[in-house]
Amino acid sequence: MADNLSKEVRSRNMSAIRSTNTKLENRFSKALWHKGIRFRRNVKSLYGKPDIAIKKYKLVIFIDSCFWHGCKLHCRIPNTNREFWENKIMRNRLRDQEVSEYYSRMDWNIVRIWEHSLKLDFEYALEKVSYIIMYLKYQGLVKGFDTKNIK
């Protein structure tokens, strides 16, 4: 499918896409905060700069965009400059894997939530993460917890 925008307009659109404080991140963060769960956002001192982090429970949460993180269900590679985008998304996926492995080795808990999971059933994803946090709070740490596909 041909792009209906000029290269200049498409470039401007793509460069305007935020990497932090996206609408979904903001909505999810506000919902967690409203539940009384306290955390830090986009913590630069932590590897991979997690979207949400609770150091006290050794928990990092990443909200992964379907496009930028290469969701198998929803990522559609643009036809324009296709090789660039395939390489870019592949590097992002490799980095995500590296970051998850790092936190696993450090005995941290990793929660990865796909954008489409939040859009499909926001409340379920919120409750699932809230449950994980409450579990960590009251039961101790869970080694290597990874919920990439919260459904």
Image (cartoon, grey):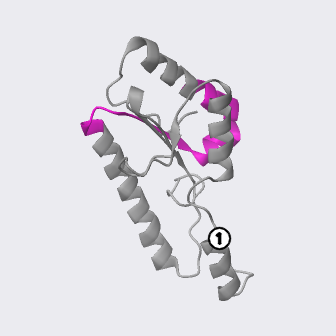
Element assignment for label 1: loop
Residue 134 position within the rendered picture, expressed as x and y whole percent measured from the top left: 51, 18
Provide residue 95's location: percent of width, then percent of height.
36, 57
Q: Badge 1: few (under 14), some or many (20 or more) residues near its Cα, within 10 Å?
A: few
Task: Looking at the picture, tell me which residue is in the foreground, 5 or 49.
Answer: 49
- Whether residue 108 appears in this view of the structure is yes
Identity of the residue furthest to the left in this view:
105
Which kind of residue does numbered mark 1 sit on?
A: Ala
Does residue 2 appear in this view? Answer: no
Main secondary structure along the magenta-highlighted residues: helix
In-front residue for pair 111/19 = 19
Assign the N terminus to one quadrant of the image.
Answer: bottom right
Asked if residue 111 is among those painted magenta in the image, a careful observer would answer yes
Residue 52 location, x and y as percent?
51, 41
Q: Which residues are magenta?
A: 104-128
Drawn side of residue 6 relative to residue 53, left or right: right
What residue is drawn where x is 58% and y is 33%? 151
Q: Relative to 49, is 112 above or below?
A: above
Residue at mark 1: 16
* Residue 13, above or below 37: below
92 left or right, relative to 131:
left
Q: Residue at x 67, y 37 (%)?
A: 30
Q: Is residue 150 left or right of residue 26?
A: left
Residue at 65% across / 24% down in the picture? 35
Residue 92 part of the magenta-drawn span = no
**Residue 111: x and y, percent?**
46, 36
Asked if residue 11 is positioned above or below residue 111 in the image, the reply reads below
Is residue 37 placed above or below 105 in the rendered structure?
above
Q: Residue at x 49, y 23 (%)?
A: 132
Q: How many marks?
A: 1
Residue 27: quadrant of the picture: top right
Most distant residue in the right direction: 4
